[in-house]
Amino acid sequence: MSPTHQPAQAVLPDLPFGMTEIEERLRGPEASAFREELLELLDRAAMAVEEDLSAGLPPADYTRATSLSRALAAAKEIVLAFPST
């Protein structure tokens, strides 16, 4: 991290509203149910990608699938780290 770089949490205010529809729903009255639904969706997608990777893919598809797998894992980490209401 450079000396002038600050983590996003330090720069962005704690907004009373979400920046995206997903964030809005994670802050909303049905947040717990939506969180579980979102985590299940991410898990299903990750399993499908892993099945494709295990089955063997051409090099270009393999590269895309591994990138997608990493993106799904990162998305799950973000959802899990989002403050529960």
Image (cartoon, rainbow, N blue to C red):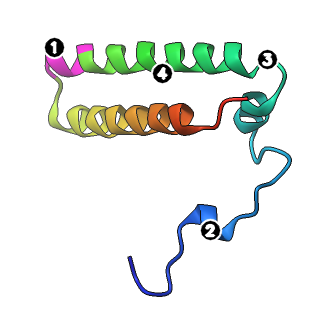
Residue type of the residue flagged with mark 4: Leu
Residue type of the residue flagged with mark 3: Glu
Which residue is denoted by mark 1 in the rendering?
55
Q: Which quadrant would residue 62 be assigned to in this image?
A: top left
Residue 32's x, y, as percent? Answer: 69, 18
Which residue appears at 84% of the width and 21% of the height? 29
Foreground tag (2 vs 4): 2
Residue 58's x, y, as percent? Answer: 16, 29
Which quarter of the image is occupied by the C terminus? top right
Residue type of the residue flagged with mark 1: Ala
- Write down the region rendered in magenta: 51-56
Q: Which quadrant would residue 73 be assigned to in this image?
A: top left
Q: Residues within 10 Å of mark 3 (few under 14, many from 20)?
A: few
Instruction: Look at the magenta stretch and give its main secondary structure.
Output: helix
Cα distance in 3D space between marks 3 and 2 = 28 Å
Cα distance in 3D space between marks 2 and 4 = 28 Å
Foreground tag (2 vs 1): 2
Asked if residue 16 lies left or right of residue 54, the reply is right
Q: Residues within 10 Å of mark 4 (few under 14, many from 20)?
A: some
Which residue is denoted by mark 2 in the rendering?
10
Q: The residue tagged with tag 1: helix, strand or loop?
A: helix
In this orientation, which residue lies closer to the viewer: 40 or 33? 33
Foreground tag (1 vs 3): 3
Which residue is denoted by mark 4 in the rendering?
42
- The vertical placement of 84 against 16, above or below, is above
Q: Residues within 10 Å of mark 2 (few under 14, many from 20)?
A: few
Compare marks 1 and 3 and give the one earlier in the sequence: 3
Q: The residue tagged with tag 4: helix, strand or loop?
A: helix
Compare marks 1 and 4 and give the one earlier in the sequence: 4
Which residue is denoted by mark 3 in the rendering?
30
Q: Residues within 10 Å of mark 1 (few under 14, many from 20)?
A: few
Asked if residue 25 lies left or right of residue 62, the reply is right
